[in-house]
Image (tube, grey):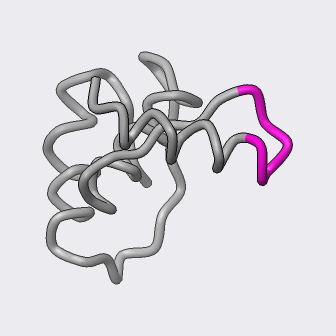
Amino acid sequence: MNPTNGVLEQRLAELEGGIGALAVASGMAAIRYAIEAIADVGSNIVSTSQLYGGTYNLFAHTFPRQGIETR
């Protein structure tokens, strides 16, 4: 773990009143971690059809292989 990231995560958690935070390298990673934190196998996500290409691919191809369906 990078100590600089650790300090950032700690400060963000304190700022938001949380018990922890996670800093990731991209918005795509943030979207993936957020969905995986709340969705299990058999979950359904309701989404708009007008998505950025990376998010579309995540919802259309990656999540179905993990048992998470997007409608």
Seen in the picture, residue 37 relative to 15 is either above or below; the reply is above
| Residue in view at x 49 percent, y 42 percent | 34
Identify which residue, 43 or 19, lies in the foreground. 19
| Residue in view at x 36 percent, y 76 percent | 49
Seen in the picture, residue 68 relative to 52 is either above or below; the reply is above
Seen in the picture, residue 13 relative to 26 is either above or below; the reply is above
Q: Position of residue 70 (x, y in %)?
A: 39, 48
| Residue in view at x 46 percent, y 20 percent | 42
Q: Position of residue 53 (x, y in %)?
A: 15, 73
Q: Say whether residue 4 is left or right of residue 44.
A: left
| Residue in view at x 45 percent, y 33 percent | 6
Find out whether residue 65 is within the magenta segment. Answer: no
Which segment did they paint magenta? 14-19
Q: Position of residue 39 (x, y in %)?
A: 52, 28
Most extreme residue toward the bottom is 50
Q: Quadrant of residue 67?
A: top left
Most extreme residue toward the right is 17
Q: Position of residue 62 (x, y in %)?
A: 17, 38
**Location of the N terminus (image quadrant):** top left
Find out whether residue 15 is within the magenta segment. Answer: yes
Q: Quadrant of residue 71?
A: bottom left
Q: Say whether residue 42 is left or right of residue 56.
A: right
Q: Say whether residue 66 is left or right of residue 7.
A: left
Identify which residue, 65 or 54, lies in the foreground. 54
Identify which residue, 35 or 24, lies in the foreground. 24
